[in-house]
Amino acid sequence: MWKRVRRYIPEKGILELVLTEFFNSWGHIKCSVTHQELFSAETWKKTQGVLHDVKKGWLSDPGSISVYTQEGIDKDGLLLYHCIRGTNSVEGAIHNPIRRNFASLNASPELADALIADFRHRHNMDTGSFHKAGVQYAGHYDPWLDHEISKLQADIAWTVSPIVSPSRLFQDTDPLDFSPTTERFGITVIPSITRIANEFFAHPNMNTQIDFASNKLWLSKLIGKRKDNYTFLAFAQQTKYAVTPLHTEDEFNLFHSAVSPGGEYASASGLPNFDHMAQWWSEKANGKTIFYKLREHLAVYYKTWNEHRQEKQTILASQPQRRPHEKRIRSTTYVSHVLPAAKRHQPGITNKEAETVSTTADIMAAHDILVQNAEASSSSAFSVIQDQDVVMQDTNSPHSGLANQDTIMQGPDAPYPELYSMPGPSSDINMHQSAIPALPPNQLSTSGLYAVWGKEKVTIRRCMICVQAGRDGKSCKGKNNRKNCEFIEVRSLN
């Protein structure tokens, strides 16, 4: 809908009056429950910041420049407008694709700069064609080829006008015939004033630039040294050494020694003089482990360093309060009661006596016990589930009193503390007496309650003809097809 409506932000005098009246009308209204005003003291400070920008005219529309252009006509005949107000188009069309493409690329500064330059060039070609001519760009992205062709065409006396490239349809002059711009995109050059103020030495190949105004076809070429990040940075910044944030171990140690008590830039109160510190840092730079720094780099890292220092001081000051707890959790006599592991399809298996694990040496012994319990549980059969999703069974002693009753979660002091269950309605768990045969004397057994979990039901098929005749019917071939029933064959022979 907003593409069909043009909005207007009034001039600063009118906008200030409207917003001031709005803030005063709503800011002092009190809540009927908390009896507090809608705007707090912090909110009133923010309103003054908004009014400051309004008074400067930064939020009003420019009086002589239209912020809308016609984008087309919809199916109902209404005009569609493109608004250039705000930065939404920049965020969606520029920043999001760049973050998406470079999220996991881990490219070197040289490759990243080249890829951003290519993206920037293609984006300008696409949007320029759409906003200037209203058509989708369908040509190639090498204007240098068109430049070369136009130069060759100018040397020929044509009797018929030659075919013009789509990128030149709306251009009277070849863009590459203009003087090159002094603007720099991507990794920018450190200004001369900043370089002198921080005592950065200039790059040996300073002011080396590609002459884009010539009629040569320029092809990009990378150095190819993937791990050499600083050579290209220094060349792009036009400094002897690269200008980077603190990132190497030698830089961290140098900064720590400089701002710590007794260091050259230690400050008992307030902040160090980062301007002088940047000049001092330039003397220590070697281009291998220590690089040039701006005052902003030092100020940002000082905040991180100071927070880490205060954290360490807090830990040291709170040591007496933390000592009992640390002594307990680090004690070699600390005991942990661990239940033995269960099989994948029998997660409800528990032991009446939990394993006790203490000290490092006992962990191996506990591991052996868990393996034995797992082997014992794997040899135990579990009951057939026909009507219930979960059936609880006791393998050692029958608890007839629990039969056909709902199971309730019990605490450790309950009559049967060894019974554990997963969360769920009590109707999903029914207790039955054990139907598992006794194990041989030489085979390990895991005492406790067994639970068969899950929605999958196991059904033992039987031959219904044999069952009606009083036979078991489990081993009869007719359990899958009555025509194969052995009882029918025997009866027919008789």
Image (cartoon, rainbow, N blue to C red):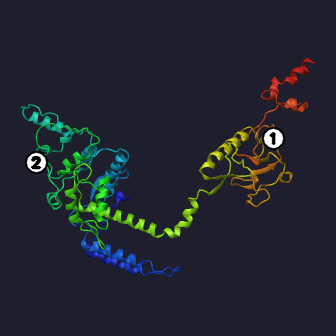
Q: Which residue is drawn at 73% across and 58% down?
A: 409
Give the camera-side residue of 201 and 223: 201
Horizontal relation, residue 332 to residue 372: left or right: left
Of the two numbered discs 2 and 1 in the rendering, the one whose residue sits closer to the viewer = 1
| Image height of 494 relative to 370, above or below | above
**How many numbered circles does the render carry?**
2
Q: Residue at x 20, y 61 (%)?
A: 280
What label sits on residue 477 in the rendered view? Answer: none
What label sits on residue 436 in the rendered view? Answer: 1
| Image height of 396 relative to 69, above or below | above
Q: Where is residue 481? Give x, y as percent.
A: 79, 27
Horizontal relation, residue 413 to residue 196: left or right: right
Type of residue at label 1? Ile
Q: Distance between the residues labelled 2 and 1?
A: 93 Å
Tell me if mark 2 has few (under 14), some (14-19) or many (20+) residues whose alpha carbon lies within 10 angstroms of its own: few
Q: Residue at x 81, y 24 (%)?
A: 483
Q: Do the residues labelled 2 and 1 touch (CB within 8 Å)?
A: no
Q: Quadrant of residue 386?
A: top right
Residue that badge 2 annotates: 179
Q: In which quarter of the image is residue 437?
A: top right
Horizontal relation, residue 147 to residue 100: left or right: left
Q: Where is residue 268? Give x, y as percent.
A: 31, 73
| Image height of 244 relative to 458, above or below | below
Type of residue at label 2? Ser
